[in-house]
Amino acid sequence: MTANRFFVNSKDIKNDKCFLRDEEHFHFSKVLRGKEGDEIFLTDGDGNLYKGKVISVRNKLTEVKIIEIRKVDREFPPITLAQSILKSETMDFVIQKGTELGVELIIPVLSKRSKSIRKENIEQKLRHWELIAVNA
């Protein structure tokens, strides 16, 4: 199996072990058909790159033993993008491309002419945008 890179939340890293959950677990176990003993790379979004070996693949969780930790230095200063909220597909596109180009932080801004979001949908939109950024 080729070395693949997976996003792991820093709260899922405990000592020398970490866990793939949800979409990352599904991608590893079902899409790539990963198995115990595979070596993978993990990133936590904070500039850390982990090399790990899969210990177990369970029903909804993949357990990985961390073999090596590297701090990845950024070549450029951190970039923050303040983006007025756009229509759904356009906003998704801006988040995806911004992340691919190295934007570290995207701040959704409400402006006079921006797309309105109802209060009850804010949390759902933020989770959706976070998922797009992680997948990018």
Image (tube, grey):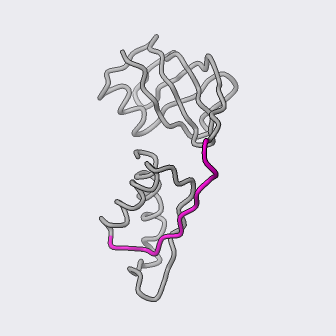
* Residue at position x 54%, y 67% in the image: 107
Residue drawn at the location 63% of the way across and 32% of the way down: 13
Q: Where residue 44 appears, x then y in whole percent?
A: 58, 38
The answer to whether residue 48 is above or below residue 54 is below
Q: Nearer the viewer, residue 130 or 46?
A: 46
| Residue 42 location (% of width, % of height) | 53, 30
Residue 25 placement, left or right of 105: left
- Between 69 and 17, the one nearer to me in the picture: 69
In which quarter of the view is residue 66 placed? Answer: top right
Magenta residue check for 79: yes
The part of the chain drawn in magenta is 75-87
Looking at this view, name the residue that lies furthest to the top.
37
Residue 93 is situated, as x and y percent measured from the top left of the image, at 34, 60
- Quarter of the image with the N terminus is top left
Q: State the image coordinates of residue 32 (x, y, percent, origin top left).
A: 32, 24
Which residue sits at x=62%, y=53%?
78
| Image vertical order of residue 17 relative to residue 9, above or below | above
- Rendered position, 8 above or below 129: above
